[in-house]
C-alpha cells in the first residue's frame, strides 16, 4: 500500500478549515452561527487565502465557539451559552478553557502561522476583554 501523500502546511490549513466549517455547521443545527463561521467559509470558497489569514480565521472561530456556545456531550450539538464568564473566573474549567485558547495562539505564532501582533490583538479583543481583567491580571490569572 503506498504511503499517504505528505500535505503542505497550506493544504493542512485548508483541510482544517474545511473540516472545522463542516463540523461546526452541523453542530449548530437550528442555532445562529457566529459571523466568524461565514468569514472562514467565504475564505475557503474563494480559495486564495494566504496561510496566515486562514490560520487567524480558524483561531478566531475556535475562540468564538468556546466562548459563545455550550456543547452537549452526548450529541455534540451547540447552543448559545448563558454562562457569565466574569462572575465565574474562579471556576477551574473557565481558566482551563482560556488557557487552552491562549496557548493555541502562542503555538500558531511559534509555528510562524501568525505574527505576534495578530495573536496579541486577538487575545486582547476576544479573550482578555471577556474577563474584565487587565492584560497583566489575565497573565497572572493563567499563571504566567
Image (cartoon, rainbow, N blue to C red):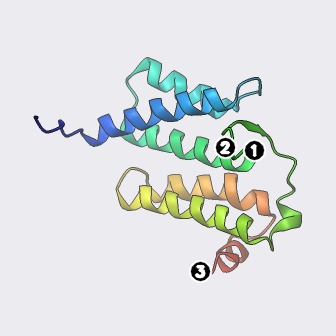
Which x, y percent locates residue 74? 69, 43
Residue under numbered circle 2: 65
In front of the other: label 2 or label 3?
Answer: 2
Q: Is residue 59 above or below residue 104?
A: above
Mark 1 is surrounded, within 10 Å at the Cα level, by few (under 14), some (14 to 19) or many (20 or more) other residues, namely some
Structural distance between the alpha carbons of marks 3 and 1: 25 Å
Which x, y percent locates residue 100? 58, 62
Q: Secondary structure at mark 1?
A: helix
Which label was assigned to residue 144?
A: 3
Which x, y percent locates residue 103? 52, 64
Structural distance between the alpha carbons of marks 1 and 2: 6 Å
Considering the image in quadrants, where does the N terminus appear? top left
Q: Which residue is pictured at 72% across the width and 50% down the height?
A: 67
Badge 3 or badge 1: first in the primary sequence = 1
Badge 2 or badge 3: first in the primary sequence = 2
Residue under numbered circle 1: 68
Q: Pointers 1 and 2 in contact (CB under 8 A)?
A: yes
Q: Which residue is pictured at 53% across the width and 22% down the height?
A: 42
Mark 3 is surrounded, within 10 Å at the Cα level, by few (under 14), some (14 to 19) or many (20 or more) other residues, namely few
Q: Quadrant of residue 36?
A: top right
Q: Quadrant of residue 141?
A: bottom right
In the picture, measured across the screen, residue 13 lies left or right of residue 128, that is: left
In the picture, measured across the screen, residue 51 lies left or right of residue 62, that is: left
Q: Which residue is pictured at 73% across the width and 64% down the height?
A: 94
- Residue reaching furthest to the left: 2
Amino acid at each position: 500500500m503506498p504511503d499517504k501523500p505528505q500535505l503542505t502546511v497550506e493544504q493542512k490549513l485548508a483541510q482544517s478549515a474545511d473540516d472545522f466549517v463542516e463540523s461546526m455547521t452541523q453542530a449548530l443545527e437550528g442555532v445562529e452561527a457566529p459571523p466568524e463561521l461565514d468569514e472562514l467559509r467565504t475564505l475557503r470558497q474563494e480559495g486564495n487565502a494566504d496561510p496566515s489569514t486562514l490560520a487567524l480565521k480558524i483561531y478566531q472561530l475556535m475562540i468564538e465557539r468556546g466562548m459563545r456556545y455550550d456543547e452537549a456531550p452526548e450529541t455534540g450539538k451547540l447552543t448559545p451559552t448563558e454562562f457569565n464568564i466574569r462572575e465565574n473566573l474562579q471556576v477551574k474549567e473557565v481558566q482551563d478553557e482560556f488557557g487552552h485558547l491562549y496557548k493555541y495562539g502562542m503555538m500558531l505564532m511559534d509555528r510562524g502561522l501568525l505574527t505576534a501582533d495578530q495573536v496579541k490583538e486577538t487575545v486582547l479583543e476576544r479573550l482578555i476583554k471577556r474577563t474584565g481583567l487587565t492584560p497583566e491580571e489575565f497573565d497572572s490569572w493563567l499563571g504566567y
